[in-house]
Image (cartoon, rainbow, N blue to C red):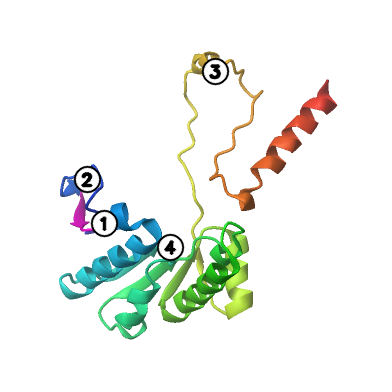
Amino acid sequence: HDVTVYSPSFHPYKESTYKGVKIKHIYSPEEWMGGSVGSIFYDFWCLRDALKRQNFDILYEAGYTSVIPAYIWFDIKNLKRSIVVTNMDGLEYKRTKFNRWVQKYLFWEEKMAVKHSHFLISDNLGIQDYYKERYGKDSKFLAYGADIITAYNVDILNEFNLRRDEYYLVIARLEPENNIEMVIQGYLALQGSTK
């Protein structure tokens, strides 16, 4: 496969390739405009470059919250030479960190992503069910994953005062919807029941 990844100009990695993948550095005003507004311009310029200067078979967009204006502007649903695939991420409009006006805007963006994308990706089965039930739209389930390590040095756990099979690890963004507090309370309750 011939793969190109777009990267914001401020990213510290400045090479034009990485392990056989081409890197296309595009100016991004995120540093001075802020991530939310700046990423709208960045995504617009990336999509413009991909459509006008490249000849890609597939355009894969990881998330939709900043690219929808570009999807509409470039009328991607009617593209003939490229297929647009959007990884829908989570239910952004339900995140409690956003006020109701931002939530309404994010819900509109979700609808536009479903309407304009050729194909959708869901990163969990619940999201896949949601898009099928709400919009009647199928999506391809692609789970996050990692290589399973079977041979490792157990002594490394000693650095952290841990013992094999006697600890829990949670990896998540600190978002209310990820229920980190509930995980901690569950762990504490479990500890209390085993004493």
Q: Give the range drawn in magenta.
A: 18-28
Local secondary structure at mark 1? strand
Q: Position of residue 10 (x, y in %)?
A: 24, 49
Label 3 Cα crowd, 10 Å radius (few <14 / some 14-19 / many 20+): few
Q: Is the magenta stretch mostly helix, strand or loop?
A: strand
Give the amino acid at mark 3.
Answer: Phe
Q: Distance between the residues labelled 2 and 4?
A: 22 Å
Q: Distance between the residues labelled 4 and 3?
A: 35 Å
Q: Nearer the viewer, residue 161 or 104?
A: 104
Residue 43 appears left or right of 102: left
Q: Earlier in the sequence, mark 3 or mark 2?
A: 2
Answer with left or right where residue 122 lies relative to residue 45: right
Residue most toward the bottom? Answer: 78
Q: Are marks 1 and 3 in contact (CB under 8 Å)?
A: no
Q: Quadrant of residue 116?
A: bottom left
> Which mark is drawn over residue 5?
1
In magenta segment, residue 26: yes
Residue 129 falls left or right of residue 33 = right
Q: Nearer the viewer, residue 16 or 112?
A: 112
Mark 2 residue type: Tyr
CA–CA distance between discs 1 and 4? 14 Å
Closest to the camera, between mark 1 and mark 4, is 4
Of the residues under marks 2 and 4, which one precedes in the sequence?
2
* Rendered image: mark on residue 18: 2
Give the amino acid at mark 4.
Answer: Gly
Residue type, label 1: Val
Q: x, y (%) of residue 57? A: 26, 71
Residue 63 circle label: 4
